[in-house]
Image: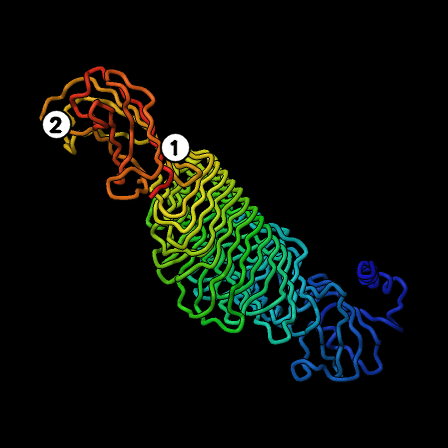
Amino acid sequence: MRNRIYRYILHAIPFLLIATAAHADNVQIATNTAALSAMSVSGGPPVVMRLGYVAVGDAPTLLYIASSLPCSMNSGSGDGGAQVPSVDGKCWVATFPAEGADIREWGAKGDGSTLATSAFNAAFAAGNVCVLVPPSTNGFYVDALTIPQGGCLRGSATAPGSYNAGYAGTSWIKCVAVANSTCVLSAASDGSHSPGIIERITIVGSPSVPNSGAVGYQMTDGYNIVIRDLSVFNFDTCTKWGPTIAGIAAHVYNLNQGRCRTHYSVVDGFPEVYFYGGRWGMNNSGDFTNSDDFVLFTRTTAVGAGGGPNTVILDGIQFNPGAGGVGCAFKWAGYTGSGGVQQIFKILNSHVEYHTYTGSNETGFFCSDSTVPSIRALWVDNVDGDNGLTGGLFNFNSATALQEFHMKDTTWNCSGTNIDFSASSTYAEANFFTHNTWCGTVSWGGGSSTSLFLNQNTDIGKLTLSGTWGNLVNSDNMIGGLADTATGNVTASGFGQISWTPVVTFGGSSNTGWTYTSSGFAARLSNGGFKLHGEIAFSAKAGGAAAGSFNVSGSPYVCSTAGAGDPGSATPMVLLHMAGLVTSVQAQMLSDTTVVLTQYASNGQVVLTDANFTASSQIQFDVECNKAQ
């Protein structure tokens, strides 16, 4: 309220002074900076009201107090805003409102063509004042701007809008996107870790197709900086965090980014960056069509005292590249620096529209290159994605070890997409894939020290499990099919079925001697064993010399046995149905996944041969093994 009253007084004073002629004794009027500088402090008024920088109204009215000392800035020349030298060698010192100083007080013009960098630099040099950027039609034009440590840059309005429609009514900065340069840079913090503030600002690059390496906003080393309602559009890299050797602690609220030609954000080093809310990408054709990624996680410096593990959190963000696409939504690559533990990454409560396209740039949703040795942890929670994902969810390089992975409560429209870690290095810690709704195939390849918990996932097209696992728990998943060759400490409940086709031979011959049809399924049991079900129907003698014992092969599981060729310990052997056969037939499984049928005869238990079958023979059998090998 106090600041609001002050503003009312400032706007009312010129009219009151003119009406009452009070300026003759107390406060005088200076129409612009030149008029103020022509006034004498000695014997003059103690207070002067400036009505503009060059002309009345081109800057807000500003109150100046007379000082008997020369201006302290620029060897007595002042800066034209905070200090204006008087004609008698003294100084007029500005009294800014508590909320900050309008950039136009230093002569900046929001016409999009008059360079305002020197005005911003002078405003920041004034110190202890927040630099205010008012709304404009064409923006304030800068080439390269550095916000000093602890500096404050604030707009009065911001909206992402559309690049093609312009930013009228927005507090925005227009920057020439020079190759390998940064438009707005927050200076590194010193040991005092002073905070800084950037809020309600839009930064736009020009020309319409930015130069390679041009960055919209960048923060290097620093702590406790708060960024709110920042919008960055039309750069090669829209925002960059780092490179850093000591660390970054930044909280970013409502970051809007679009028309980012290569990267939307680059996180370089070992920062702690927390992004909350915002939109990364534009609708329809607003974005470029061949961006590399939404986020590039990289490390180009050696890790210093602030080296990890640190955390990067992306929470409540809409990722939308419009009609364009990104080669890899979240990418780890270019690790040329050394040392330190890798970061922990969390993507939470977000929506990802991954508009894929054909071309060499499309590599997957999460991916890495050979420079990345490990990713400490990746958490994906309450995220939904749509529009393709045809590049696959994971495309990690074989040199990259993902040590811990959690994905839960996610929903994906991902026709034909799979999760496949089989090409990656062994990841040694607990991994969770729970409560997800998935449409494509899911493939997991394990390691002897790896644990994976698959629980209550739905609508998975096909689940493929392979490898030797330290621990694998597969429970209560609704899946379209299961291919399970996993070994090790594996348990299951509410199991899914694997379709398999029994293959019949006699005496090991590839020629069955019979024409038949067969089908079956296999299922992992909660006790670590499995169950096989097979159905075989003979129709005609096929000819040939096939003879000998009846064998059924093709089981996806191997039964743990006491000795070579022996049935599994305490393995139940059951025949559900038979026709055209002698009675008392049993099914048993050998160690090489072969099922044999035996019958009891007068001279003891013997195996069935091709002579035991007719063209009308039918068999349905179950085999349960208590322990999978």
SS of the residue under disc 2 = loop
Q: Residue at x 57, y 46 (%)?
A: 349
Binning the other alpha carbons within 10 Å of mark 1 as few (below 14), some (14 to 19) or many (20 upward) gives some
Q: Quadrant of the C terminus?
A: top left
Q: Nearer the viewer, mark 1 or mark 2?
A: 2
Q: Quadrant of the N terminus?
A: bottom right
Tell me if residue 136 comes above or below residue 476 in the rendering. Answer: below
- Whether residue 340 sits left or right of residue 551 in the image: it is right
Outermost residue toward the left? 545
Asked if one can make out residue 79 in the rendered structure from this viewpoint, the answer is yes
Residue 497, which numbered label? 1
Binning the other alpha carbons within 10 Å of mark 2 as few (below 14), some (14 to 19) or many (20 upward) gives many
Estimate the spatial distance between the alpha carbons at disc 1 and disc 2, rounded to whole Å: 32 Å
Which percent across, then down, holds residue 461?
Answer: 40, 34
Asked if one can make out residue 290 in the rendered structure from this viewpoint, the answer is no
Tell me if residue 589 comes above or below residue 181 in the rendering. Answer: above
Which percent across, then down, holds residue 622?
Answer: 34, 28
Disc 2 residue type?
Answer: Ala
Q: Residue at x 83, y 79 (%)?
A: 44
Give the residue number, with chain letter if any, for mark 2: 546
Q: Residue at x 57, y 71 (%)?
A: 187
Q: Nearer the viewer, residue 45 or 448?
A: 448
Disc 1 residue type?
Answer: Gln
Q: Nearer the viewer, residue 361 or 133?
A: 361
Which percent across, then down, holds residue 148?
Answer: 61, 71
Residue 188, which numbered label? none
**Mark 1 vs mark 2: which is more N-terminal?**
1
Residue 16 picture quarter: bottom right
Which percent across, then down, holds residue 12?
Answer: 83, 60
Q: Nearer the viewer, residue 198 or 61?
A: 198
SS of the residue under disc 1 = strand
So how many labels did they put on this image?
Answer: 2
